[in-house]
Amino acid sequence: MSYTPPGKMRQVRRIRVCILAVALLLCIYWVFFGDEVTLNVGEPPVLSLGTPPEWIEMCEFLERDWQGNEGPIDDTGYRLRGIAIAFRHGERSPMHSANSHDACAPFRELDRRDFEQYRKLIESDDFQFFLRHDPKFKAFAKIPSLSECSPQQMTAEGALQHVKLGKYMRNKYAGSNIFSPESRLNVSVTSSQYNRTFQSAIAFTSSFLYPSKASVPQIFIQASNFTFMCTHKNCQCNLAKKWRHQYEQEHAGYFLKRSPEQLRIFADALRTHSAFTKTVDPIQMMDVALGRFVCRRRSLPCFGKGNCLSYGFLSELLNETSVRGKIMFDEGPRYVAKKLQLVEAHGVLYHVVEAAMKLRSFPHTNIIQARLPSVFSSSVILCLAFAVAFYLFFIFSGHDVMLAPLLRVMGVPFTDPPRYAAHLVIEFYEAIDSPSAKDVLLLRFIYNGVDITRNVIFCEIVLKNGLCPAHQLENFVQNRIFASLGVVSLKDICN
């Protein structure tokens, strides 16, 4: 056996320790950063930390890239006249619990800096002049906390999601004349009476409309009377709140009696974890999982004897809530679901029909004449004529329980609940050479960037360019929406 001097042995040990340290660092890097998902070449990677793409989308991580079909169609025979957008609020803490006091700061330093810039904008004198709101919002905070977690309250990332949505939408319509200095924008902004929806409306308008403050010097955020965005007596239903509570009870009852047994067994075990003690329904379980773990980019918790919450189980819950929602709606009299959701969908659709009627009532351009005294003679008058283009914007800042009834009544398949900052866009078009006032207005429906017009139940006739004649929506809302209940009007149901 050869002899190794003590100094040489110490050197060998040091080399081995260094090799082990490097190997350990590589393992740590692989565990924490090995699952980066780059959605588009040239875009910043999503720091998923092992989060599957489905749940990255449910949280709507800020670095996730968006691509969609919004924006004017490529057909010179049609002119964009307006846009309605209904969106869910941004990311929030769970409804009935929250993480530790300061655990809700944005994940990335870049986003923390962006939120500070956003805060300065909202608190500026110029924006304070731009923003007007219903007195019912007087005590509401205009921005969320940078880092504080509080039940039901939106996070800073939630506000930035809607700043991002506003920029995205503005970029989509930048190629049209909507934001040109000559345009006049008729804007309606409605929010439910919750901090998170009020703050989402402010965040969206700060990037979508505020850059056009020359054309829109002020906006007014109106308070809706409930979560389904009604602001008029013709869409009001005082029983809807009671029915919503009944629906949530029936939801839980369905899960306990009709959902797959393996889901119920695991849900019982999950409730032994302190964060999930009060959860009964799958939507409540996902709410806690998103608000305290997934969207905060924390590891999913373990509980009991070797049990851990997994993304596989969460995906099974998400599939179950989507299937359950459709079954409860389709089974009619057995549940309150159909009656409730027809009433809830009617709120936004009623106002969309209002917008269509308003667009028909005045043309795209009005000729305005200005009479100026001549510099040469007081007896000569110079007449200047110029065209002013009018556009409509309807903005509804609401909840998953606003979007889900809309999509279900429209007959469009969707994941239930819709993700944070999910958005339904309705584009209004005018047929330039149409001889018929009835056929002059057309619609296009886009959900989360996907054109869904051909799936909409009342768009029985869709033109070659993918547009739906607006009179089909008007006929549906005015005459057919409640037919499956055996009644004609909202009044017949709510009385």
Image (tube, rainbow, N blue to C red):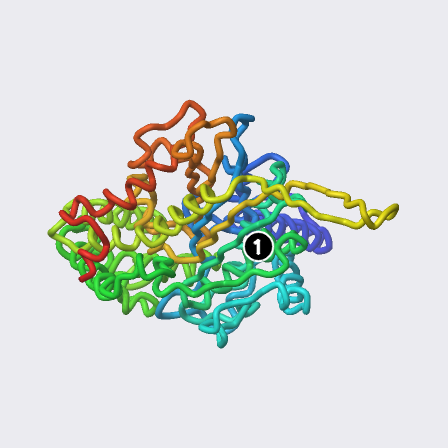
Residue drawn at x 43%, y 65% is 223
Q: Quadrant of residue 454?
A: top left
Image height of 141 relative to 407, above or below: below
The three-letter amino acid code for the residue at tag 1 is Val
* Quadrant of image for the C terminus: bottom left
Residue 330 x/y as whole percent: 18, 44
**Observer-nearest residue: 280 or 91?**
91
Q: Is residue 329 left or right of residue 453?
A: left
Residue 361 x/y as whole percent: 46, 44
Q: Is residue 384 left or right of residue 54?
A: right
- For this orientation, the residue located farthest to the bottom is 139
Q: Quadrant of residue 227?
A: bottom left
> How many marks do you count on the picture?
1
Residue 453 x/y as whole percent: 38, 34
Q: Quadrant of residue 306?
A: bottom left
- For this orientation, the residue located farthest to the front is 379
Label 1, on which residue?
163
* Quadrant of image for the N terminus: top right
- For this orientation, the residue located farthest to the top is 464
Residue 217 visible in image: yes
Find numbered disc 1 in the image and state the secondary structure of the residue it sits on.
Answer: helix
Image height of 22 relative to 471, above or below: below
Crowding at dot 1, Cα within 10 Å, few <14 / some 14-19 / many 20+, comes out as many
**Observer-nearest residue: 305 or 91?**
91
